[in-house]
Image (spheres, rainbow, N blue to C red):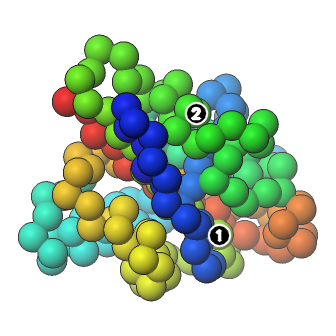
Amino acid sequence: MRAGRIIGSLAAALLCVVAVATSATAAPSATRVARVAQLEADVLAQLNAVRRGHGLVPLKLSATLSKAAEAHSVQMGEDGYFAHESADGSVFWKRVERFYPSRGWRYWSVGENLLWSSPDMNGPEALRLWMRSPEHKQNILSATWREIGVAAVKVPSAPGKYNGLDVTILTTDFGVRR
């Protein structure tokens, strides 16, 4: 999904959904959800390699966009849903804006990709899946973006949509402010 001063949107697709959203106060649960820092670093490296291969500048890791991505990955894992919208039904860009404010900038835009898979997902696999989806590929190869947040969490016996499976949920939040 992508949003700016004039909000636009893209459709979700196939196995992965361009997405994010949730509570600005969500924090990882020590017993249910665990961050996967190595996967986050691998995804960032793979994503920037794909961008360089297409003549695009690499994205800089943003702490605030990463916090937005983490909040969403955690909430989806704990609440058992996988969607563009936040758990409360609000559009993703409103949640991201709480972490990555638009105020004071002449131009602001955000976008997101989501993926859930088996616990042993890796960076090349995540990029391969996203690049098969036109909407996800468009986010990855957009010359607009300058920053990115990446958050991966492992959720044992994930509820709801995940049918009690052990899963890894990955959220990437793209952003630009000028």
Q: Are marks 2 and 1 in contact (CB under 8 Å)?
A: no
Say whether residue 30 is visible. no
Residue at position x 69%, y 57% from top? 83
Dot 2 lies on which element? helix
Residue at position x 83%, y 57% from top? 80
- Left/right of residue 160 with respect to residue 47 in the rendered view: right
**Disc 2 marks which amino acid?**
Arg
Camera-side residue of 49 and 83: 83
Q: Residues within 10 Å of mark 2 (few under 14, many from 20)?
A: many
Mark 1 sits on what residue? 116
> Residue 53: which quarter of the image?
bottom left
> Residue 59 placed where, x, y %?
24, 53
Rendered image: mark on residue 95: 2
For the C terminus, the image quarter is: top left
> Residue 113 placed where, x, y %?
49, 60
Q: Is residue 62 above or below residue 33?
A: above
Residue at position x 27%, y 67% from top? 141
